[in-house]
Image (spheres, rainbow, N blue to C red):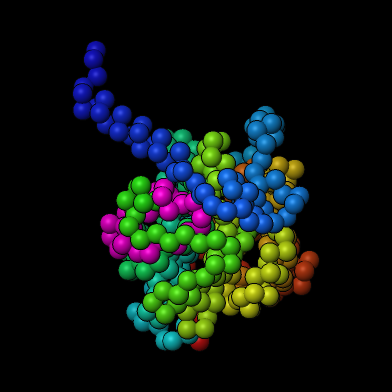
Amino acid sequence: MQMPFTKVARLATGACATHRSVAGGPGHRGPATDHFDGTVFRNQNPRSTAGRSFRGFLRRQRTSRATPGPKRVGNRATPNLPAALETGEIAITFINHVTYLVQFRGLNVLTDPVYAERVSPVQWSGPRRAWEPGLAFDARPRVDTAPVSHNQYDHLDLDTLQRLEAAHRPLFLTALGHRAFLEQHGLARVWELDWWESIEHAGHRYTYTPAQHWSGRALPGRNRTLWGAFVVEAAGRPVCFAGDTGYWNHFAQIRERCGRVDVAMRPIGAYEPRWFMLDMPMNPDDAVRAHLDLETVLSIGTHDGCFQLTDEGIDEPLRELEVARQRHGVAPHDFRALETGATLRLGA
């Protein structure tokens, strides 16, 4: 039986959209720097390979012993968004994975916005969420800025970014090599930053800082775009969103160049098997060491629980975080994790 023309057209359109999503844009072209050779980016740490080898990937696929996770877990927290904030106050609502609504007086920031059912090129395969988003998409207040740390699927969710563009037309802040790709998909206000570059926008300061990671939405185009973290400062309150990163001395550099950070959201999940994931991302012990390097007032663990991306159990990072806190003498209230949907309000 011949397939109806409308279905063929719909499949063809979806295939083209998926191809554009996987292609990831043209990448960055420019002068060579200490972390860019003119074509691809690299980490500061010379021992870090900025991505795994294909041979290592095949070995991991062959030997993987992932701990099974739950198919769906009910959210136990309810957002409590503030009606208003005083100058210097911060409200942080954990939506899922790496997505936080960070609210200052007169400023709403949505980090690495991900509302997808799966973090994958297609929505019929790939890591699937175990928790519903803690704050429904239509329940969000106005989004002013949306930092996008790098282009992997669990951080750059095109569908969510396009929905944000249609609803709020926020300023999208991202790294070198992403602007053409995002504009190609209909985002109007995109600002690219290199490591240590800062911009002032509407009275607030945004600084893009180094991370130890890699980029790419498919094997072709690996590391043609930059990866990193953001420090957002509003009314003298700096908040660091670490995106995804391994542990190295860049946390001490951020402390030296940006000062002490009030709040940092940093990854504690997606780290097993360690032979494959050693340099990136961090495990909970690495994250606690980063907390000490950065001298953060409060750290919040992220990048765990929602999508099972690696072999550790979905709740293992929280158990290991408790062990790491005790090992390094960090109090539970200084490095905590939020329930999905929970709102944390910090006074001035």
Residue farthest to the front? Answer: 31
Asked whether residue 168 is drawn in magenta, I would say yes
Residue 178 or residue 158, whichever sits in front: 178
Q: Is residue 123 above or below residue 295?
A: above
Q: Is residue 120 above or below residue 84?
A: above
The residue positioned 66% from the left and 30% from the top of the image is: 58
**Residue 332: image location, x then y, percent:** 66, 72
The residue positioned 35% from the left and 47% from the top of the image is: 184
Quadrant containing the N terminus is top left
Asked whether residue 342 is drawn in magenta, I would say no
The residue positioned 43% from the left and 68% from the top of the image is: 109
Residue farthest to the right? Answer: 327
Q: Is residue 101 visible?
A: yes
Q: Is residue 271 above or below residue 54?
A: below
**Residue 268: image location, x then y, percent:** 63, 58
Residue farthest to the left? Answer: 5
**Residue 236: image location, x then y, percent:** 52, 83
**Residue 72: image location, x then y, percent:** 47, 47
The residue positioned 21% from the left and 22% from the top of the image is: 4
The magenta stretch is 154-181
Residue 300 falls left or right of residue 327: left
Residue 21 falls left or right of residue 37: left
Counting the numbered discs, the total is 0
